[in-house]
Amino acid sequence: MNIGAFVCSCGGSCNIDLEAVRDGVDDVDVVASSELLCQDGLAGMSQVIEEYDLDQIIATTPEPSCQDRIRGLADEHGLHPEASVFVDHRETNAWVHGEAAATDKTARLINATRAGLREEAPSRTVSKDAGNRVAVVGDPGTARSLTDDADVTVIADGQDFADVEGLSNVTIERGRVVDIEGSYGEYELTLEARVTDDCIDCMDCVREGPDGMVTEFPVDIYPDAPDGAWTDTCPTDAIDLAGVTRTVEVDQVIYPGGRDDARGGRLGFYTGPVDAGTIAAVESQLGGIEKPQFLDLEMDVCAAGASSQEGCTACVDACPHGAVDRPTIDSVEFDEAACENCGACTSACPTGATQLREPSNRRLAREVEALLEDDADGGLLSRGDDGIDTQVIAFVCSEYAMERLRAHGRKAVQSGDLDYPPILPVRVNCTDTVGEAHVMHALAAGADGVAIVGCGGSCLHSGPDPKQDLVDRLNQATTDLGLGDRVGFFAPEAGNPEAFAESLSGFVEFGLDETPIPAGDYEATGRSDADREEPRPNPDFDSHGWTLESVRTILDHVDPEREVIRGLKDFGVMDVSDACTLTPTCTNLCPTDAIQRTGEGELAFNHADCVNCGLCEEGCPETAITMHDGLDRSLLPENRGGEAWVTVHDGDMLECVRCGKPFTSVASATKIEEEVGSQVEGLAPDADHSVFEYCSDCRSRLLFDQGEKR
């Protein structure tokens, strides 16, 4: 594939050195520049596309009209509609940075874009069938607006629609909503009413009942209505003040006064004020949906549980859209049609069972590595040459956060007195995508710091709290590694660029020292098992393996005082008490095979493979296991002469008195004999030993022989 990069200074409004940018761009077939690329420069751009037979274009313009002109030119040359990609050299760059920094940053952004394109995933789709049934709770006006295309049911929810017109094409359901379960295409509403379906709308109860407590249409009674003789007026005995429930099944729900348990909202479930966007969304999803596939799932490595024991709950806890469910206590299930591409489950998952397709972790890694430059090579401008002195990787949400940064840039060019440090942006779908693996990788690649730039309270997914919690955890980890605080969370506010500039400047200019970890020559594999004969079954760039690889790289350049690195959730340390009887439960349950029982009566633990799912602790019948968070350097094989396994419990094994084979622990055999020995006493009266001293094979033979003698 032939790739060309085109750099513009927007008629001189972007103060960048075009020649220096051209010199700083790597790994493309041609770099060209123009003062006004989207207008006077189009003819020259056309010649370059023709001469170099380009298949892909990287151009520096954030302006939609300019992008359209360049796409049009690319289309004239027969390029794919998505073959033109764009870099912001203006609002989030030259308009808020000095010339040297903006020049340096522009070249790096082009290089990172090229690196990311190399890892771009092919598009795939998912679909889900649904019907046209829509339930609207308490809003007859909205119900009317949907009747042309949908089969609409309006739930009265205690309201009286007697004077509401235009509901002839709407099904009316009495009752109040007490519960809503399910997902898009299969929602189930539970309604409670004080009037049964035997009601014939005779109006007797409306006339005789307490004032204001009986609705006329549909007929229903307020929950706190008093009992009395008036209830006997019903000719069909349809009044039930204790309440009756029934369910209504629909494909989508509009509930203006409701609350969604999913923090970011669920597909096909709408709460809050209804507007034209709500109606359009509902109508677009009638009959089913087809959408991009956002996730790659490898459930074989999932640590959700086993044998009716609950293990890892990370994805279920993290998903803000109700797209991950736990149908059984030991499994999870993804509704890919309900996925909103925020990445919360993928950054939370320790094993790689769920990963974003685009941008993939591999793509993000390559973009980060391309943005960071080594002083020894000089880069475009070395530290101290007024280029980018402090290298801060910024994971920026592509929704409101990016929009606000661009708006801040427009404010800056108007006022002329606003700037902030030249952070190196990596666009993510939402900052929910960012987890400990991404941050530790950026630091391992040589970043001086990491900024997570999100939407704050405007976040369409999980909100700001999980990001701040992540920052707090990772600053604990970087401090334990001897690096001090290296991570910050920022939420630019609309119309307040000064606050963002001040907080970011404080973090970059006063909070960060130069990292001891070199940049510019690092390429992550996304694996922690490169030296092992039998690799882990997990996919590349799973959170646990990728984080461990990054921490090991960091440890090559630092000398921390602590052995245990706190703040990393995907690592656990096992503590086993004397209550352990060496049953095989924990070894059978462990989803990463990080626990093994030896024939010598030892329980061994592999810290490097443990993802801290808690399944062993949950399932231990003796409650002998306690798991502690943290990465213990002393337990890693490189600090133990290459030995990955450490003994966490040492007990005696019982050998079969007949064949000599070790078959269980002495403690386990003793415990079982104490619990059930009296019940099996006399099964083998002529045996020389207790039946508990025989292995299962020899015990079966013994009992068979004893039976034949009787």
Image: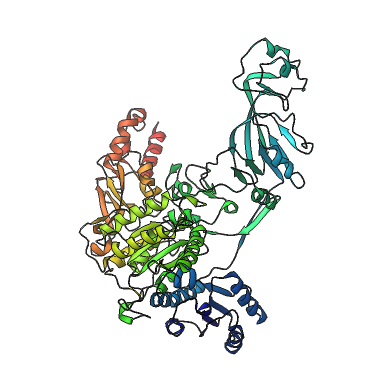
Residue 388 or residue 531, whichever sits in front: 388
Residue 183 visible (yes or no)? no
164 left or right of 57? right
Q: Position of residue 622 (x, y in %)?
A: 32, 38
138 left or right of 29? right
Residue at x-position 38% and y-position 52%: 468
Name above or below for residue 346 compared with residue 115: above
Name above or below for residue 88 compared with residue 395: below
Q: Position of residue 168 (x, y in %)?
A: 79, 36
Quadrant the C terminus occupies: top left
As drawn, the residue found furthest toward the bottom would be 51
Quadrant the N terminus occupies: bottom right
Residue 467 or residue 329, whichever sits in front: 467
Residue 602 visible (yes or no)? yes
State the colouring used for the structure image.
Answer: rainbow
Q: Position of residue 533 (x, y in %)?
A: 36, 67
